[in-house]
Image (cartoon, helix red, strand yellow):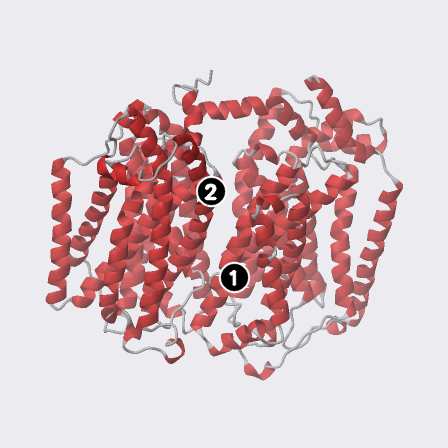
């Protein structure tokens, strides 16, 4: 087939989900909306009756909402960070993956931030953060870096979408879609100057986004490590959280990719090799995660502070030990063989590993937050305990459903695999790779 | 190919060799003199600084080759052999670490007055066993890795130049079969070895950081310390690599491989590691400073905040190890002027030496009276001795091997296009 024919083929496959809606789609949306409504109703109950309806108590005053907050912010690292790193290192295989990843970031950052609001008995007081914020407080750092990250990720998602918007604008027949795509395309007609500006902007954003992303989870970890609570106060928390975030984010990305591949029929674009490569990234993160977890726990054991040891023992062999060991098994012992052995690093294998990792990383946040609060440094609350109420479960289900819903709606409006990137891949990859090879080849870059 | 081998004579001139041996002799003399003259603690302290500095750097240097092997990176290939050259110092560094056991009584408070709760971990027999074992296994595996990477190159070199590498080459190629078969077999082996070595490096170097450095102050502990320590070593290793490459890349033929683009990449990697190191330091010290707990804050207060001789050093190091690379190596211009980049790298190496100093000396002085700044003949001569030893080993190795990994497919692919 000639290149132009391929282009038609690509366009047809990638735009199909936008212009054709099946019955199953409506059913899926209805189910998700119901779940979101469940969460919403739970929240309304909580709002009217106060936080007493949750399982939170003294001394366990942070629970499911904060766990979800950390978890969702962690997931957000999948997108922008991975996409930016792949772009910076000029990995050609990134093309079909970037958009899918970037959307995750924007969607879950909003939901993560929302969990903080949910955790407040008086959500209106969030304004105090802006009115009377104290820069000494890690909470303000959090608000700052998450807002910065959300802004940067949204821009970073939008910029490469502009040419796609123009393609959609030129391909739809009119109506509200034409207006929407026309507005978002910002008058893109693909001149050389436009390409140049777009590429410059993208290159700059890719560099900017990496330190912002790293700072986000470092600062999230500071919320814990800046306290003097046993086993929260740990110097490793910054990098540990960043590693965990990339780890869980990659896992979520793989799950989403596998689902989209099936549902949107993108088998030709998301190939086993993409899963294989992301699986390798995840393998490295698995090992790093295990190292950091080991360093955190063994050093606490070495430090042997009485307060820390109480928390340590409650995780290692006490009431929280089932969760602790479930975390270790599902974050390390199950994914490691799957990801390390070439034969298992298939689409199915990586997805199975990813599911375990997502569960394990959720448990990790649980195991970091709850046992410490139940065994605080001040002994009078020694026997804290916590169990979630139906309200919290409802809100959590609502949050996950909202994530899925945002994603599903997004995929109805915008192509999940960047049309422009795929085109560019077909047209230019050869030249780009040759050009890069030339830079390294001795003899003034002669390849013939 | 043959041109590469002709350029692979990275040897010291006789004058340099004599000078380096003289420095080693001075170092040894200073060490013995320091021990018998009653300044045992100071001598051992300088010895510890240099063992962790040069030993850590030698190990980290090989890790560059391991990283390139794992990531399948093509751009790093021309530097692979140089990175493996660092390994030549490892046997010496093992001996140095073992020698340190004899000075433990002067350095580690826990040898004589252990804290009750940590006695189970911090006691001499266990200390000796776990560190000797850990280091020996790590160094042995590193040697297997280097040998594995070297053998096919040596065989290829011998096809072109008979007797290349002398008896060293003979021993290396003992039991070497058919070249084509061996190349594939050893590449497969390297694929398995490299990740294992990466993991082992992180574990053993964390152990070294905890045991040899962190336990100087037996009350203090920081969970990030292991990572902080070995990233610091990678930092030094890369800085030295920039310097070595600057002097190596002038040679004809070699300069085509170690092109300016590749040098730029190496400088960029140094920049990245410098930022990672800063991040590790920042996220560690900010947490300690902010929480202000009695068992950990003194470590930082003594070094960075209170009016001690260490405070200026701490802030100078912030400038040397963070501000300097941030302002210079971030720019493309400087990364592409090898001599300038190498000059900066030299400053970074010095900075890292003082970073080791700052971790070790205040802790050793500990409660023994007022903190006092010591820097004199003991430190200078021991450092010179260690450095000279390192370079003697390095050049001994480099004088016998092909400078580029000539049998590595990821190198030759671009070469055949020539």
Whole-percent x, y for residue B55 in the image? 29, 53
- Residue B295 lies, with reference to residue A404, above or below; the image says below
In the picture, the quarter occupied by the N terminus of chain B is top left
Q: Nearer the viewer, mark 1 or mark 2?
A: 2
* Residue A106 appearing in the image: no
Viewport quadrant of the C terminus of chain B = top left
Disc 2 target residue: B191
Q: Chain of mark 1?
A: A
Q: As displayed, is residue B124 above or below residue B57?
A: below
- Quarter of the image for residue B354 reads bottom left
> Which residue sits furthest bottom?
A380
**Residue at the image position 55 percent from the left and 82 percent from the top:** A379
At x 53% / y 41%, what residue is drawn? A208
Q: CA distance from mark 1 to mark 2?
A: 26 Å
Q: Measuring from the top left, give residue A320's x and y in whole percent.
A: 62, 72
**Residue A184 appears in the figure:** yes
Say which mark, if any, is on residue B67: none
- Residue drawn at 12 percent across, 43 percent down: B19
In the picture of the structure, the residue carrying the numbered disc 1 is A293
The residue positioned 19% from the left and 56% from the top of the image is B379
Q: Is residue A119 left or right of residue B235?
A: right
Which chain does the residue under circle 2 lie in?
B
* Rendered location of residue B7, percent (x, y): 26, 27
- A275 sits to left or right of B90: right
């Amino acid at each position: 087939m000639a290149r132009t024919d391929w282009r038609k083929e690509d366009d047809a496959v990638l735009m199909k989900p936008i212009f054709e809606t099946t019955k199953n789609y409506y059913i899926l949306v209805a189910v998700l909306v119901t779940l979101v409504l469940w969460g919403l109703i739970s929240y309304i109950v909580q709002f009217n009756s106060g936080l007493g309806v949750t399982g939170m108590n003294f001394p366990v005053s942070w629970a499911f909402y904060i766990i979800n907050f950390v978890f969702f912010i962690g997931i957000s690292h999948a997108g922008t960070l991975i996409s930016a790193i792949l772009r910076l290192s000029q990995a050609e295989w990134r093309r079909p993956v970037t958009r899918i990843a970037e959307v995750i970031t924007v969607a879950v950052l909003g939901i993560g931030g929302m969990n903080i609001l949910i955790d407040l008995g008086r959500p209106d007081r969030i304004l105090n953060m802006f009115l009377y914020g104290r820069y000494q407080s890690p909470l303000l750092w959090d608000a700052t870096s998450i807002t910065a990250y959300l802004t940067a990720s949204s821009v970073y998602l939008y910029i490469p979408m502009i040419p796609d918007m123009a393609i959609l604008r030129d391909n739809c027949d009119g109506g509200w879609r034409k207006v929407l795509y026309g507005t978002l395309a910002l008058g893109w007609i693909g001149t050389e100057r436009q390409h140049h500006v777009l590429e410059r902007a993208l290159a700059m954003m890719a560099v900017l986004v990496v330190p912002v992303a790293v700072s986000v989870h470092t600062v999230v970890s500071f919320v814990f490590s800046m306290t003097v609570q046993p086993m929260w106060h740990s110097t490793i928390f910054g990098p540990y959280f960043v590693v965990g975030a990339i780890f869980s984010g990659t896992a979520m990305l793989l799950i989403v990719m596998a689902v989209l591949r099936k549902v949107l029929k993108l088998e030709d674009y998301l190939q086993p090799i993409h899963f294989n490569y992301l699986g390798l990234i995840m393998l490295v993160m698995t090992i790093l995660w295990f190292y950091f977890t080991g360093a955190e726990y063994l050093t606490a054991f070495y430090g042997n502070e009485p307060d820390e040891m109480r928390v340590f023992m409650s995780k290692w062999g006490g009431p929280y030990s089932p969760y602790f060991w479930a975390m270790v098994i599902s974050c390390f012992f199950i994914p490691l063989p799957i990801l390390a052995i070439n034969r298992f690093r298939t689409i199915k294998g990586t997805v199975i590993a990813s599911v375990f990792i997502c569960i394990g990383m959720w448990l990790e946040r649980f195991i970091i937050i709850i046992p410490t609060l139940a065994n605080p440094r001040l002994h009078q609350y020694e026997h804290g305990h916590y169990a979630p109420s139906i309200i919290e479960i409802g809100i959590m289900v609502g949050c996950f459903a909202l994530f899925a819903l945002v994603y599903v709606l997004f995929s109805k409006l915008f192509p999940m695999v960047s049309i422009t990137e795929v085109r560019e891949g077909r047209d230019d990859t050869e030249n780009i790779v040759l050009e890069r090879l030339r830079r390294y080849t001795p003899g003034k870059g002669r390849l013939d | 190919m043959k041109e590469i081998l002709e350029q692979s004579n990275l040897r010291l001139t006789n004058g340099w060799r004599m000078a380096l041996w003289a420095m080693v002799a001075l170092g040894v003399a200073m060490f013995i003199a320091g021990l018998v003259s009653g300044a045992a603690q100071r001598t051992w302290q300088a010895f510890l600084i240099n063992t962790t500095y040069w030993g850590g750097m030698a190990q980290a240097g090989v890790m560059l080759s391991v990283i390139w092997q794992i990531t399948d990176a093509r751009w790093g290939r021309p530097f692979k052999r140089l990175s493996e050259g660092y390994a030549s110092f490892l046997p010496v560094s093992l001996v140095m670490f073992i020698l340190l056991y004899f000075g433990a009584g002067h350095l580690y408070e826990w040898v004589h007055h252990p804290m009750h709760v940590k006695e189970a971990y911090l006691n001499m027999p266990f200390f000796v066993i776990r560190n000797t074992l850990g280091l020996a296994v790590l160094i042995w595996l590193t040697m297997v890795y280097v040998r594995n990477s070297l053998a096919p190159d040596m065989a290829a070199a011998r096809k072109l130049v008979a007797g290349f590498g002398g008896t060293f080459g003979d021993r290396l190629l003992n039991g070497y079969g058919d070249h084509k078969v061996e190349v594939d077999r050893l590449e497969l082996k390297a694929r398995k070895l490299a990740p294992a070595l990466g993991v082992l490096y992180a574990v053993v170097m964390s152990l070294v950081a905890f045991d040899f450095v962190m336990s100087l102050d037996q009350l203090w502990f920081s969970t990030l310390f292991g990572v902080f320590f070995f990233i610091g070593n990678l930092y030094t290793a890369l800085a030295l690599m920039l310097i070595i490459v600057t002097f190596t890349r002038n040679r004809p033929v070699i300069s085509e491989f170690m092109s300016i683009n590749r040098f730029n990449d190496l400088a960029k990697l140094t920049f990245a590691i410098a930022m990672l190191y800063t991040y590790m330091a920042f996220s560690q010290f900010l947490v300690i400073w902010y929480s202000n707990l009695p068992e950990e804050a003194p470590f930082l207060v003594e070094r960075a905040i209170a009016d001690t001789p260490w405070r200026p050093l701490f802030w100078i190091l912030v400038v040397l190890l963070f501000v300097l690379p941030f302002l210079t190596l971030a720019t493309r211009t400087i990364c592409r002027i090898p001599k300038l980049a190498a000059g900066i790298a030299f400053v970074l190496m010095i900075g890292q030496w003082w970073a080791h100093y700052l971790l070790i000396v205040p802790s050793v002085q500990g409660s023994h009276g007022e903190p006092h700044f010591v820097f004199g003949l003991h430190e200078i001569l021991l450092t010179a001795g260690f450095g000279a030893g390192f370079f003697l080993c390095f050049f001994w190795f480099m004088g016998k091997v092909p400078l580029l990994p000539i049998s590595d497919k990821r190198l030759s692919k671009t070469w055949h296009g020539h």
